Amino acid sequence: MTTLIHEARQAPGDLDWALFGRQHWDRQPTRLRARPPVGLDQLHALTVQACAPFRAGTRFGVMPDVRILVGDGWLRAPGTRLPDTTDRTLDDYLDRLDADASEQGYLLIVRQPLLLDFALWSAVRAAICGLWRAVGWPNLPVVTEVLIGDRFTQHAGEAGAPTHAALTWVLQGRMDVRLWNERSGPPPAAIADPDRDLDGVRTMSAEAGELLYWPGDRRHVAAYRERCVALRLWIPVDRRLPFTALRDLLADLVHSRQGNSEAVPYFPFGPGSRVDEQGGVLPRLTALGDELRAVVDGEQLRRMLRVRWAALRSAAGLEPIPEPREGIAMSRQTRVRRSSEIVRMPDGPEHEVWAVNGNVFTLPRAAGDRVFAALLDGEETSVAEVCRAAGVGDDNSVLALLDKLYRLRGIDVVEVPAR
């Protein structure tokens, strides 16, 4: 029969991620009271911005990605059924969509929208970092979705083998989710029927101000009740996923060693093309294996993996990342404050990698130590003090570094003295 999910009892507000990690992470689905990291008005403005390019039709291979499903179909040319700037609030948009959808259910999915707004990206990053400190930092990007649904049942999580755990903040309305443990075999055909009690199928519901979590071994069917709005994070947990990413990286590196040739890789065939003769299939395959072995044994792969990890760690897994902001003119009198975590990693004997909000660059290690020490965490300091601490004898190089840190939002300017 249907089993209700365990509900963790705690006071409303911020989550105790350490307790969550010990009791629930990778163990059991749960529902908790939790303050969403973003508000409805913020989410509406972000959705309008993300949807603007899609009003003319579906776009492929771009982020953010927007899809709207109405009734039983995905609208390839959604047009006015997407929110725009004339919708002052989310309810205004939903009123308009209700009238246009002819009483059909619908679901709007906006994937990876946070790259458009650093403030919201940073808020979600701050909200999730506590979990990573408790369970470990993700080694692949986390997928973010804004979900706006009404009287719609989503079956996508039922079809394929699960590879990601899910965290879903409900901001408005209600969401019902039916879960099936993948280790128990294929889900029953009636998993989506809320009126059927099925052995092994678990059900949980969440309303505004609640968070749903299920581990990465659960297939799911989600039902969006009237005007449900949610923010979901898909967290990669399947052990095979890093190997897929590494395989793709190795393929790119081998391809670059071969001159990035775009020629179709057909092997010779026919009279005079013996398998083992020079230029035949076997020597070519052997050469490809030699290239792969050289890549695996080389320093380039190790460095790329180090740099990749530093970038992902500083972004807390939230990739793609927002664009840098515009720089401003600084002088020795300008006062600055470090505003973001700086992830540092050795890069050879004399240099190190700095990663800030998902952006990566290198600098000499000795100067980096001194500059990092001068940029006290959260405390004000002057550009002159940073230049003096750097001890490089060239203010321009320090100003260039501080400008980079400002554009990457690693530091904020407290005041710019009048000239």
Image (cartoon, grey):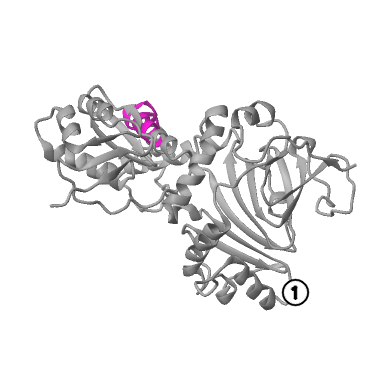
Residue 273 picture location, percent across and down: 40, 45
In the rendered image, the residue lying farthest to the top is 349
Residue 384 picture location, percent across and down: 16, 35
- Identified at 12% across, 37% down, the residue is 395
Per the image, is 20 magenta?
no
Which sits in the foreground, 364 or 18? 18
- Identified at 55% across, 75% down, the residue is 79
Residue 328 picture location, percent across and down: 22, 51
In the rendered image, the residue lying farthest to the front is 418
Which sits in the foreground, 187 or 124? 124
Q: Could you tell me how many numbered marks the image carries?
A: 1
Which sits in the foreground, 262 or 110? 110
Q: Quadrant of the N terminus?
A: top right
- The magenta segment: 292-308
Judge from the rendering whether residue 57 lies leftward or rightward of residue 107; answer left or right.
Answer: left
Residue 75 shows in this picture: no
Judge from the rendering whether residue 76 lies leftward or rightward of residue 206; answer left or right.
Answer: left
Magenta stretch: helix, strand or loop mostly: helix
- Local crowd size for mark 1, using a 10 Å CA cut-off: few (<14), some (14–19), many (≥20): few
Q: Amino acid at mark 1?
A: Glu
* Above or below 256: residue 293: above
* Above or below 280: residue 387: above
As helix, strand or loop, the secondary structure at mark 1 comes to: loop
In the rendered image, the residue lying farthest to the left is 393
Q: Quadrant of residue 257?
A: top left
Which sits in the foreground, 318 or 371? 371
Judge from the rendering whether residue 171 lies leftward or rightward of residue 245; answer left or right.
Answer: right
Residue 405 shows in this picture: yes
Residue 397 picture location, percent across and down: 15, 38
Residue at image mark 1: 103
- Identified at 22% across, 39% down, the residue is 401
